[in-house]
Image: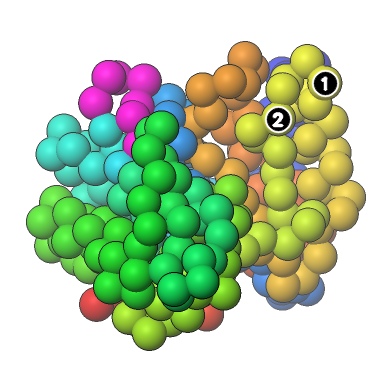
């Protein structure tokens, strides 16, 4: 089945390249760090299709036993910068904003701990990613961020906006489902659903690896991009991203 899907993707890509069809719509591909198990696969597919994505980075633990923003990952991120992708903050700890407190602070939970962050603390959590990314690549983040799980609060959003970060969610159809269990949501199902439901303007979301999914979705990015191109879609960086800081 997978071989047939990939063959179909190759044919669709070849047809798209030959015809040079004008865009019938624009999609925005965003990719969160996750476990990084599929990082190289995703990079190869993006390069093959000449698609630019917006990466949202957190210092998450990886399948190599290190963390996604450790110096050992510097070469990977420098290569993505050279390719012209965009980059936003996904918080340093990949924590969850659990609610606003009466004193204006925000409950923030990660790694079994919970903190109460004021506006400066929220900014520091986002900017720590920017500082590390600049140290690794020489380039700062774009002025965008995504809360882990998409879970925000009014105070967290306001604090982030005040320090220059616009929050980016995803479209309902853009949830590619790579964090769902593969026994109930096999790759072929997720691929077919995305090809059917995505519409112009949708923000897509996936990860560079998910710990819990047995059959990684990342290889399906190849037929997905080819199929969407065959439908006449082009891909762009988020309007608020794409410019160096």
CA–CA distance in space, label 2 to label 1: 8 Å
Residue at 72% across / 22% down in the picture? 181
Residue on which disc 1 sits:
184
Bounds of the magenta segment: 60-66
Q: Is residue 204 left or right of residue 67?
A: right
Residue 238, percent from left and from top: 53, 72
Q: Residue at x 53, y 40 (%)?
A: 207
Instruction: Count residues near mark 1 (Cα–Cα under 10 Å), then give few for <14, some for 14-19, many for 20+.
Output: few
Q: Is residue 94 visible?
A: no
Give the vertical position of 3 relative to 206 (above or below): above
- Position of the C terminus, as image quadrant, is bottom left
Could you classify mark 2 by the number of other residues whose Cα lies within 10 Å: few (under 14), some (14-19), or many (20 or more)? Answer: some
Query: In the figure, is residue 217 to the left or right of 110?
Result: right
Question: Going by the picture, which residue comes out furthest to the front?
Answer: 102
Where, quadrant-wise, is the N terminus in this rendering? top right
Label of residue 122 in the image? none
Mark 2 lies on residue:
180
């Amino acid at each position: 089945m997978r071989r047939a899907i990939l063959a179909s993707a190759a044919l669709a890509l070849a047809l798209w390249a030959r015809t040079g069809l004008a865009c019938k719509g624009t999609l925005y591909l965003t990719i969160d760090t996750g476990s990084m198990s599929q990082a190289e696969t995703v990079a190869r597919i993006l390069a093959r299709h000449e698609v630019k994505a917006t990466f949202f980075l957190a210092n998450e633990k990886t399948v190599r036993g290190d963390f996604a923003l450790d110096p050992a990952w510097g070469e990977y991120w420098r290569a993505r910068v050279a390719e012209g992708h965009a980059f936003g903050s996904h918080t340093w700890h990949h924590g969850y904003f659990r609610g606003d407190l009466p004193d204006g602070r925000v409950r923030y939970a990660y790694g079994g701990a919970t903190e109460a962050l004021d506006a400066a603390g929220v900014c520091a959590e986002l900017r720590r990613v920017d500082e590390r990314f600049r140290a690794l690549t020489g380039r700062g983040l774009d002025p965008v961020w995504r809360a882990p799980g998409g879970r925000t609060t009014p105070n967290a959003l306001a604090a982030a906006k005040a320090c220059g970060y616009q929050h980016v969610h995803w479209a309902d159809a853009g949830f590619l489902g790579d964090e769902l269990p593969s026994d109930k949501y096999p790759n072929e199902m997720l691929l077919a659903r995305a090809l059917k439901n995505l519409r112009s303007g949708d923000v897509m979301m996936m990860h560079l690896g998910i710990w819990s999914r047995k059959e990684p979705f990342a290889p399906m990015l190849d037929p997905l991009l080819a199929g969407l191109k065959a439908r006449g879609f082009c891909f762009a960086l988020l309007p608020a991203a794409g410019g160096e800081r």
